[in-house]
Amino acid sequence: MRAPYEAKFRGGNDMKRFLILSFAVIAMMAAPVMAGDSESYGDGVTLDEAVAIDVLLDNPNDYVGRKVRVDGVITAMCKKRGCWMQVTDQESGNGVRIKVDDGVIVFPYTSMGQEAQAEGIFEAIKLTPEQIEARTAAAQDHKEGATCDKDGPKSSAVGAGCDAPAIDEYVYMIRGTGAVIKG
Amino acid sequence: MKLRRLIIATHRDIGYFFAGLTVLYAISGVAVNHIDDWNPNYVIRRDVVEVGVLPFGEPAELAAEVLSRLDVTEEPRSVVRMNREELKVFLNQRTLTVTLPGGHVVDEHARRRFAFFEVNFLHLNTGKGFWTWFADIYAVGLLVLACTGIFIIPGKKGLGGRGRWLLIAGIAIPIVYLVVVVWR
């Protein structure tokens, strides 16, 4: 006995037509995804105005806990998971890391050097003495060509790489909700 | 019996339709599971090159000088002076980190890992849009496969015997894991 729908698909020409139609529909639906020159990640960018990274880092206490948007060039990236990226002001070289939940947003490694807009909650993380020590050791490894992400102790990473920029005893980063990377 | 035949036919056809995608998702699943050990999407190669002492100059000029010394003709995507001692020159899938003024260059190339990049692109739904819908349909398909699979074989090797115990074992393993690791 055939299942009720089996009479519709008896193989041969019917199946060929079905396959051709399926491929055509897929091509039409996927085309808009491929055509875009900016890629949106997570919730994208919702704030109209960005805070200059220099202003953010000069006055961190004014922004901690607030949702902010930063614009700049991607100068560093989580090499394995794509779970953080550093957005840097091209003029000053100051940067801030955008940390996202593993697997929820994955920044592509090949977008290094591209312009990005990113937003999320600005956070200040006070480093422990052990973390400071581990960061120093990781920095020394880095000078010898070792990758900080691979060799740095996880305790030093504060979730955004063990070489995340720090001011005094604090790492300032953005708990990212979304980003737009320009192609 | 009619119902069982319908179950078998449904299981068979959905199984054929999604067999290829299931293989791809399984490969990607293993690859992504071991993300602590490797980058499943890209092969990143790191070379260290000495280009000699560099003159003072604007970032663009310094980048041009470094690229010239490395015989690279590609226009940089962007150039950023990270601090007094470090310049980054970004090319397509390649980053040069230059120590100033000594000319120590860390040359990092990234290329897509053959086949894995594509299967991970599908599995992690990087493309969104159409694939979100198709992956949802696939998930429903898997659900149907699981539910119909349970009832394909009657009798001792089915839910009446061996099948029942395998079904219970398969459900118990994740529950025990959750009890031990998450819910304790």
Image (spheres, coloured by chain):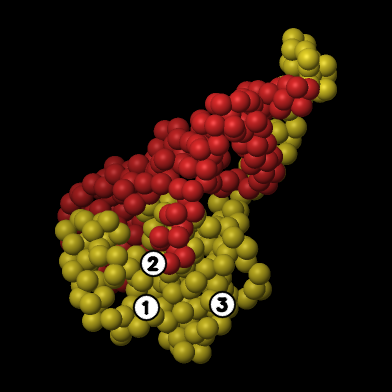
Chain colours: A yellow, B red
Residue at the image position 24 percent from the left and 71 percent from the top: A135
Name which of mark 2 and mark 3 comes first in the sequence: 3
Label 3 neighbour load within 10 Å: few <14, some 14-19, many 20+: many
Reading the image, the residue beneath label 1 is A171
What's the amino acid at mark 2? Ala
Say which quarter of the image contains residue A31.
top right
Name which of mark 1 and mark 2 comes first in the sequence: 2
Q: Chain of mark 3?
A: A
Residue at the image position 62 percent from the left and 31 percent from the top: B149
Q: Which label was assigned to residue A160?
A: 2
Label 2 neighbour load within 10 Å: few <14, some 14-19, many 20+: many
For the residues bearing labels 1 and 3, Cβ distance under 8 angstroms:
no
Residue at the image position 53 percent from the left and 58 percent from the top: A104
For the residues bearing labels 1 and 2, Cβ distance under 8 angstroms:
yes
What's the amino acid at mark 1? Val
Reading the image, the residue beneath label 3 is A68
Q: Position of residue A134 (x, y in %)?
A: 22, 71
Q: In front: mark 2 or mark 3?
A: 2
Residue A18, above or below B149: above
> Do badges 2 and 3 share one subunit?
yes
- As helix, strand or loop, the secondary structure at mark 2 comes to loop
